[in-house]
Amino acid sequence: MEIEKSNQKNLLKNALSLIGEVGHMNELLTDHHIYRMGAYSVEIAKSLGWKPENYQLLESAALLHDTGKIFIDSSILTKPDKLTDSEWRIVQKHTIKGYKILNKINSPLFQLAAEVALNHHERWDGTGYPKKLKGEEIPISARIVSIADVFDALITKRSYRKAWDFEEAKKYIIKKSETHFDPKLVEIFISIFPEIKKIYSSFQNFNN
């Protein structure tokens, strides 16, 4: 029975990983981005005192944060030049599209994933999207994933820019505290930065 449960958990994890990777297929973003940012999210949640069952759920939900991007044309997501206003509006819709898909499944995991997908581009000062939520109006799950997602995106090479180094990305996160990001969570992220670097290195070793 225990072996069967373990196999079921592994099957679910693999399925979630596949869905998460499909969400980034049009973006050509690889190199374990969704797995690293999920792991960063766990470390932030641990520092907040979350129970294992809750931060494990968040890690799985984080894999699905960009599910809606499957509906965005790759020519837009990989465009090397600045997006036009109309293209930017199309990109912003991935949050709502992802939410609508994930919210159809009535389970704690997919409800949390839907919450993260919808809100991870909201900003602490209310200038984000899609609903311009402000401060603690933004679910804590999305506030955590937002920091993890942006940091890892910065240190990952994109079609339109080179990868930033760790210190550049760290300074950006600090700079955007109280505007883009929850200042309390930024403090936590910086305090666990050595662990964040270890997580990144562990995936580099995996590649090798």
Image (cartoon, grey):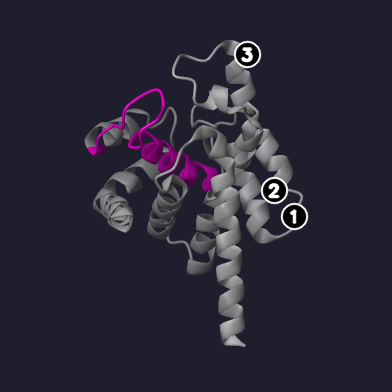
Does the magenta-highlighted stretch encompass residue 149?
A: yes
Crowd rating for badge 1 (residues with CA inside 10 Å; few <14, some 14–19, many 20+)? few
Q: Quadrant of residue 126?
A: top right
Which residue in the structure is indicated by mark 2?
Answer: 102
Toward the bottom, the furthest residue is 1
Residue at x 45%, y 14% (from the top left corner): 81
Task: Specify the amino acid type for callout 2.
Answer: Leu
In the figure, is residue 206 to the left or right of 51? left
Classify the position of the C terminus by image quarter: bottom left
Q: Which mark is residue 86?
A: 3
- Which stretch did the figure color magenta? 140-166
Which residue in the structure is indicated by mark 1?
Answer: 105
Measure the C-alpha gap from mark 2 to mark 1: 6 Å
Residue at x 54%, y 43% (from the top left corner): 142
The location of residue 33, given as percent across then percent down, is: 43, 45
In the figure, is residue 14 to the left or right of 71? left
The location of residue 2, given as percent across then percent down, is: 57, 86
Crowd rating for badge 2 (residues with CA inside 10 Å; few <14, some 14–19, many 20+)? many
The location of residue 158, given as percent across then percent down, is: 40, 30
**Mark 2 residue element:** helix
The location of residue 51, given as percent across then percent down, is: 48, 66
Does the magenta-highlighted stretch encompass residue 58?
A: no
With respect to residue 162, does 102 lie above or below?
Answer: below
With respect to residue 90, does 22 lie above or below?
Answer: below
